[in-house]
């Protein structure tokens, strides 16, 4: 069930109690901001700003997920799901996203092993650092406070759902920026990191991009921009863990590892394999589905490789952290860190939106150093891997 709301300055007003047998939905009207951004799908986190990202992620979502999950669990994890799709992605598009890399495999395994050494299990790590799951009213409250802090109250529609493979997503629906949050993963100490990821990174870079000469596909081509990923997701992932006491890059590492193993294994083999890192069957199922989405017969080796972009982007940004102007990286919109110096003379930089956590450069850099330290990453190692 999806609940949607516009977070207002006056708290949340719920509708009258519905009559029985009527599905309950929560709606709140939001006063329009003075200048509501005019957005299109070009705002989304796509390399190709024509909206193809939106199409492929929709196309590779199985329509029979719950049915196959039941069958898989009943088989005691021995049945390889056979996924069905309403509008399957083109084979050429799937082929483009089917090549897994092992470039950062060693780092991904090391990050997870370090986490397990400290906490014993992923579940204990999640409880100790994430805290308890939040109720829906508390999620609304946290989101509203964050929007006030970033000065974007009234600009974003927020949905709560349990039907999402990721923890959250920032998209555009009918020209309106829309944040969808997975309530089953919304933990007390991790929620603000998710908001820094989705709003402080994706939303602000998307808004800033609209003002730039490269705000269209033709504009990107004309200015010879590199793809905005892996920078986009790498930066957002760093912001997810930025102020954590123990900023382990666990999720990015597990996604990277799972995709690589999926390219070599069947669904069942993969599910068993990642059991050494995650015990909970439901969590393992979610990671396996992400890595195998787009495929019909999951008894065959094969992966959807997009999820490797998070760790790839994180490590590239950490490698060059001393030379990156993070303020400009946000202000210039959907650009790669590699293009910042070249584009800054062509950019519109007045009235750009920059999140609060980027205002104190010294503090920001200190936290990047802490991420390096906690995950036992060294500059020597990163320079050998990324050049």
Image (spheres, grey):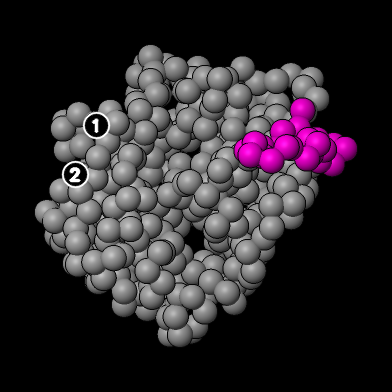
Mark 1 Cα shell of 10 Å, populated few (<14), some (14-19), many (≥20): some
The residue at the far right in this view is 10
**Which disc number belongs to residue 291?**
none
Give, as a single range, the part of the protein colored magenta.
7-29
Q: In this view, does 351 lie to the left or right of 340?
A: right
Instruction: In the rendered view, tell whether residue 65 sits above or below residue 258.
Output: above
In the displayed orientation, state which residue is furthest to the front.
20
Question: Can see residue 358?
Answer: yes
Query: In x, y percent, where is residue 184?
Result: 55, 57
Gap in angstroms between the C-alphas marked 2 and 1: 10 Å
Q: Mark 1 points at which residue?
A: 88
The answer to whether residue 242 is seen in the rendering is no
First of labels 2, 1 by sequence position: 1
State the SS at label 2: loop
Q: Is residue 293 above or below residue 192?
A: above
Side of 192 where 94 appears, left or right: left
Which residue sits at x=73%, y=42%?
A: 147
- Residue 53 in magenta stretch: no
The structure residue drawn at horizontal position 16% and vertical position 60%, both measured from the top left corner, is 266
In percent of the image, x 19 and y 61: which residue is there?
79
- Magenta highlight on residue 18: yes
Q: How many marks?
A: 2
Q: To which residue does mark 2 refer?
A: 296
Whole-percent x and y of residue 217? 39, 18
Name the side, left or right, on which 156 lies relative to 172.
right
């Amino acid at each position: 069930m999806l609940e949607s709301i516009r977070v207002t300055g006056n708290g949340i007003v719920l509708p009258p109690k519905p009559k029985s047998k009527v599905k309950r939905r929560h709606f709140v009207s939001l006063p329009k901001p003075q200048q509501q951004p005019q957005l299109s799908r070009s705002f989304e986190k796509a390399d190709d700003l024509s909206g193809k990202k939106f199409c492929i992620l929709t196309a590779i979502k199985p329509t029979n997920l719950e049915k196959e999950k039941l069958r898989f669990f009943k088989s005691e994890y021995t049945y390889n799901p056979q996924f069905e799709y309403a509008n399957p992605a083109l084979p050429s598009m799937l082929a483009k996203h089917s090549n897994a890399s092992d470039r950062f495999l060693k780092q991904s395994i090391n990050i997870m092993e370090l986490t397990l050494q400290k906490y014993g299990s992923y579940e204990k790590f999640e409880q100790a650092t994430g805290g308890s799951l939040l109720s829906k009213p508390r999620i609304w409250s946290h989101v509203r406070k964050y929007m006030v802090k970033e000065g974007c109250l009234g600009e974003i529609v927020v949905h709560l759902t349990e039907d999402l493979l990721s923890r959250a997503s920032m998209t555009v629906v009918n020209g309106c920026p829309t944040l969808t949050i997975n309530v089953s993963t919304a933990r007390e100490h991790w929620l603000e990191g998710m908001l820094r990821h989705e709003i402080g990174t994706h939303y602000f870079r998307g808004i800033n991009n609209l003002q730039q000469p490269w705000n269209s596909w033709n504009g990107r081509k004309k200015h010879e921009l590199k793809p905005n990923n892996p920078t986009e997701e790498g930066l957002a992932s760093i912001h997810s863990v930025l102020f954590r006491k123990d900023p382990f890059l666990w999720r990015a590492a597990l996604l990277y590892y799972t995709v690589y193993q999926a390219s070599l294994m069947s669904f069942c083999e993969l599910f068993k394999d990642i059991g050494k890192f995650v015990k909970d069957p439901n969590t393992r199922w979610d990671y396996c589905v992400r890595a195998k989405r787009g495929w019909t017969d999951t008894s065959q080796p094969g992966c959807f490789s997009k999820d490797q972009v998070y760790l790839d982007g994180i490590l590239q940004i950490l490698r060059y952290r001393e030379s990156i102007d993070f303020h400009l990286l946000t202000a210039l919109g959907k650009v790669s860190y590699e293009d910042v110096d070249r584009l800054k003379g062509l950019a519109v930089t007045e009235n750009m939106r920059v999140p609060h956590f980027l205002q104190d450069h010294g503090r920001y850099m200190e936290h990047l150093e802490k991420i390096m330290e906690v995950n036992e990453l060294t500059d020597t190692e990163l320079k050998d891997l990324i050049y």
